[in-house]
Image: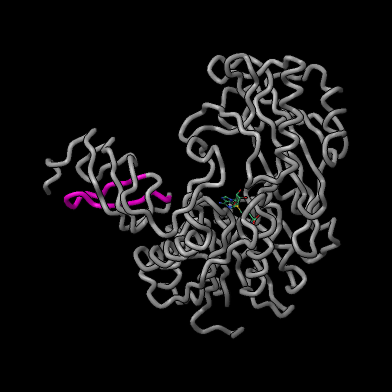
């Protein structure tokens, strides 16, 4: 390889031919792959090489000599500095196409799956203001409290008055608190020294109920003048339904501490997905894009192909959202999840909705499944919704031995999905179709759902 010709800190012109799952453009210089943040496929760009190794280089985008026809002006002023979105320079339809392509590519390259149907990614009609949860860091910059977002790849907090992917009420609440912090000279937490009080502002919004929760994360036990803040939060906008202090005195990147103190109102807010109501507490996991979640869960229901007589395992069930969604069409749904608090939420949610045919079990799926099998419980349909690392092979092995007719796999990582599908296909299963759903417009994240059938299916 002739990489000796390429030098660090020098500028080069390259053609971008590919894009990574992190939405970096990729081009080649003398055969060496060069990764460029902010560059798009089909563009000719000038880059400055800022990192060089034997196997790849990293280029900083200096100029665009031939822009992509899909390049657009980012709608957010803070886009260049903020670590949140990374695809605002690509038009929305092209983003959806990029995500479909990424899924196809992973399934072929890593899964060896050539004949599975991958549908076009389902996007949002209005891909703005879709997030129901905001976590604003707070920091003191030049004597002023700054509330906003972390700059890309750092913990420097930048002021942001508006974030167009957040619900507008979250932005509004952040503004009210910001004003209060300045007027009442509230001490702000300093990450380096571990001193100061207010660390984060967390807001959660029920999209369909309009209910609002505000959580103030503090390094202490009390917030001075909190009565005044509560008064302002109740007057603001539609008014908060639930206001908490969360105590986090650890030196950690984890946002919430363990202890919550209710300052005002209800212990939880509720929201609905489809016909079901869910309770949301400060620590509850809940999908952040409720509109697309309904799209995704409806697909799960369709792919599960239930007739009313089936037993379903919903593995990695979180607070039981998918379990409830499937319950009306199944005989029985067992939800399995490792976080105990989530299982408690799941049971509460089943009760809240008057659903009697679900059972929730706390534990690791790979440990719980063998116990269920040995006590004679077997599933006709299994839903899997694992974290990014996918499923452990021993779990997949146990599942295939149980021979469910259908497996519905919800994945947020096409690479581990491809690996797991490859295994399932080697054990008598067939990946029939894949539906990507865009849960995170303007970012490179890809979510998809897969229908997998046993080669000799009884259900059809
Ligand atoms: N299906 C849910 C949540 C999916 S997120 C929903 O749609 O809302 C993935 C979940 O898997 C998380 O709640 C995580 O706590 C859980 N998890 C991670 N490892 C696990 C394991 N080994 N066994 C069971 N659950 C696990």
Q: Which of the 4 image quadrants contains residue 188?
A: top right
Would residue 453 be visible to someone looking at this image?
yes
Which residues are the magenta region? 23-36
Residue 309 in the image, given as x and y percentages of width and height? 72, 78
Q: Mark yes or no: residue 380 visible.
A: no
Q: Look at the picture and state if 317 lies above or below 81.
A: below
Q: Height in image: 308 above or below 7?
A: below
Question: Can you give x and y, in whole percent of width and height, for residue 359 in the image?
Answer: 74, 60
User: Of 17 and 344, which appears nearest the observer?
Assistant: 17
On whether residue 72 falls in the magenta region, the answer is no
Up/down of 277 relative to 178, above or below: below
Q: How many marks?
A: 0
Residue 191, placed above or below residue 380: above
Residue at x-position 18% and y-position 37% = 7
**Residue under the point 70% across and 23% down:** 218
> Which residue is situated farthest in the front direction here?
65
Image coords of residue 147 (percent x, y): 64, 28
* Residue at 82%, 52% in the rendered image: 209
Q: Check the picture and name the quadrant holding the C terminus.
A: bottom right
Horizontally, residue 218 falls left or right of residue 410, namely right
**Magenta part mainly helix, strand or loop?**
strand
Scheme of image coloration: one colour
Q: With 29 as the anchor, is 153 left or right in this view? A: right
Where residue 212 appears, as percent x and y from the top left, is: 80, 42
Is residue 28 a member of the stretch shown in magenta? Answer: yes
């Amino acid at each position: 390889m002739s990489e000796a010709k390429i030098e660090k800190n020098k500028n080069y012109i390259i053609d971008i031919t590919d894009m990574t799952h992190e939405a970096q453009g990729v081009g080649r210089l003398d055969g060496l792959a060069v990764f460029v943040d902010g560059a798009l496929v089909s563009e000719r760009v000038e880059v400055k090489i800022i990192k060089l190794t034997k196997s790849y280089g990293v280029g900083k985008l200096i100029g665009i000599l031939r822009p992509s026809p899909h390049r657009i002006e980012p709608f957010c002023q803070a886009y260049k500095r903020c670590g949140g979105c990374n695809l605002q320079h690509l038009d929305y339809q092209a983003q959806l196409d990029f995500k479909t392509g990424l899924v196809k590519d992973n399934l072929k390259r890593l899964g060896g799956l050539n004949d599975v149907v991958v549908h076009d990614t389902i996007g949002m009609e209005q891909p703005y203001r879709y997030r129901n949860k905001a976590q604003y860091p707070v920091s003191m910059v030049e004597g002023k409290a700054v509330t906003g977002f972390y700059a890309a790849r750092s913990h420097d907090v930048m002021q942001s008055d508006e974030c167009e992917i957040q619900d507008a009420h979250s932005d509004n609440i952040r503004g009210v608190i910001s004003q209060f912090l300045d007027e009442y000279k509230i001490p702000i937490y300093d990450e380096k020294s571990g001193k100061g009080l207010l660390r984060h502002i967390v807001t959660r919004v029920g999209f369909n109920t309009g209910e609002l929760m505000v959580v103030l994360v503090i390094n202490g036990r009390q917030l001075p003048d909190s009565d005044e803040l509560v008064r302002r939060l109740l007057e603001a906008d539609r008014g908060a339904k639930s206001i908490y202090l969360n105590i986090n005195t650890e030196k950690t990147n984890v946002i919430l501490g363990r202890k919550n103190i209710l300052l005002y109102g209800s212990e939880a807010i509720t929201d609905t997905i489809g016909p079901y109501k869910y309770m949301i507490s400060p620590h509850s996991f809940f999908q952040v894009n409720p509109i697309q979640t309904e799209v995704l869960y409806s697909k799960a229901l369709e792919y599960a192909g239930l007739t009313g007589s089936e037993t379903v395992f919903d593995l990695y069930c979180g607070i039981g959202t998918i379990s409830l969604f499937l319950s009306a069409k199944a005989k029985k749904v067992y939800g399995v999840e490792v976080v105990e608090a989530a299982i408690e939420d799941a049971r509460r949610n089943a009760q809240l909705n008057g659903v009697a045919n679900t059972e929730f079990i706390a534990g690791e799926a790979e440990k719980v499944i063998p116990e269920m099998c040995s006590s004679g419980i077997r599933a006709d349909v299994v839903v899997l919704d694992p974290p990014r690392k996918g499923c452990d092979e021993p779990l997949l092995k146990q599942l295939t031995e149980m021979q469910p007719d259908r497996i519905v796999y919800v994945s947020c990582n096409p690479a581990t999905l491809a690996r797991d599908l490859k295994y399932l296909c080697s054990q008598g299963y067939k990946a029939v179709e894949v539906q990507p759903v865009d849960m995170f417009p303007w970012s490179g994240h890809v979510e998809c759902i897969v229908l997998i059938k046993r080669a000799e299916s009884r259900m059809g």
